[in-house]
Amino acid sequence: MDHHLRRTTLSERLEALEADAFLVSDLTNVRYLTGFTGSNGQALVGAEQSVFFTDGRYTEQSRHEVPDLERVTYAGSFADMLATQVARLGVRRLGFEAHVVSVRSHGRLAAALPDVELVACDDEVERIRWVKDDEELELLRRAQAVTDQAFDDVFDLLAVGVSEQQVARHLESLLRRDGADGLSFESIVAFGENAAEPHHEPGHRTLEEGDVITMDFGALFGGYHADMTRTVAFGGPASELKKIHDIVRQAQQAGIDAVREGVTGDVVDAAARGVIEGAGYGEAFGHGLGHGVGLDIHEGPRLGREFAEHRLPVNAVVTVEPGIYVPGRGGVRIEDMVEVTADGCRVVGTASRELIEL
């Protein structure tokens, strides 16, 4: 990973931010800019020089994870140690992550830096992270390959009487067996009427003939997240649910077809949502169409009616996940990660989007 290039991209934003340096506190952003994976670290990114901070627990870890930066270990107040480095670098205006720094932390920074103006900034590093480099794209593909394999293998467990929790735990064991470092998120497994809940928590509901099964899960690989949802049928599903699956599949394809460089999140959302609304189920699709994926499971750019300012760049990776949810009966969601390319897009995974009937 070219962490220096990433920091350079951020430092080139300093003039526009009217700041001499930028303090990065969000751990995911610190990892993106430095490679550090511990639980406490900060980065001060300047126009010419940057500094990494951590505590004594991570002195050795940071030595090999952050070899290209000056490293400062502190035992007491981070704000006081920051003040020393800010003074050394001649920083008069310091940008900070307003969406990360708490009111208490801001007070401590202000007290330690009385002669420095604190400049509140939003999502500066997050915006840079929208565009994935080649190594990031490869890690996302490998995470999805593990996820695809787990989906192929989970069917062996599906039988009358198995519970949602058992299937969820089995999915997770398959992901780890096939090489995942961990889980992208807690797996969602919903049987029958529970599939009407988009974020259903797996419980003791057991599988019955005629149920639909919604599974939303993903592998974590090298810090990068996969995210996939499939709804399959166990036995002959109700005719309405088969109809809904076909509508959702068409809506997802319409959304995928709309993904391209420069298009905005609201336009992609409208392409998929229009299919569902045209079929008379508009009120049954209550969430946005998708989100970016990377070091976070949910990041930008986002696809939804309120995201007209989220314009898709080449090498962004977003999910396209329309759904229809009918209370008391069930629901269908189909989700795939989609990579924005120079000439359109490509679906990252390989799992079938047709209705699988077991």
Image (cartoon, helix red, strand yellow):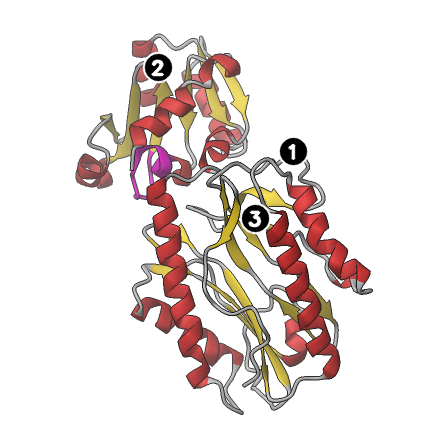
Query: Which one is nearer the viewer's eye here, 199 or 72?
Result: 199
Which label belongs to residue 53? Answer: none
Residue located beneath label 1 in the image = 309
What's the residue type where badge 2 is placed? Val
Which is in the foreground here, disc 2 or disc 1?
A: 1
Q: Is 257 situated above or below 146?
A: above
Residue located beneath label 2 in the image = 86
Measured Cα–Cα span from mark 3 to mark 1: 14 Å
Q: Is 47 situated above or below 100?
A: above
Q: Secondary structure at mark 3?
A: strand
Measured Cα–Cα span from mark 2 to mark 1: 34 Å
Q: Secondary structure at mark 1?
A: loop
For the magenta stretch, what is the residue range? 30-41
Residue 201 placement: quadrant? bottom right
What's the residue type where badge 3 is placed? His
Q: Residue at x 61, y 51 (%)?
A: 257
Q: Give the mark, 2 or 3, whose residue is nearer the N terminus.
A: 2
What's the residue type where badge 1 is placed? Glu
| Position in image of residue 154 (x %, y %) | 43, 78
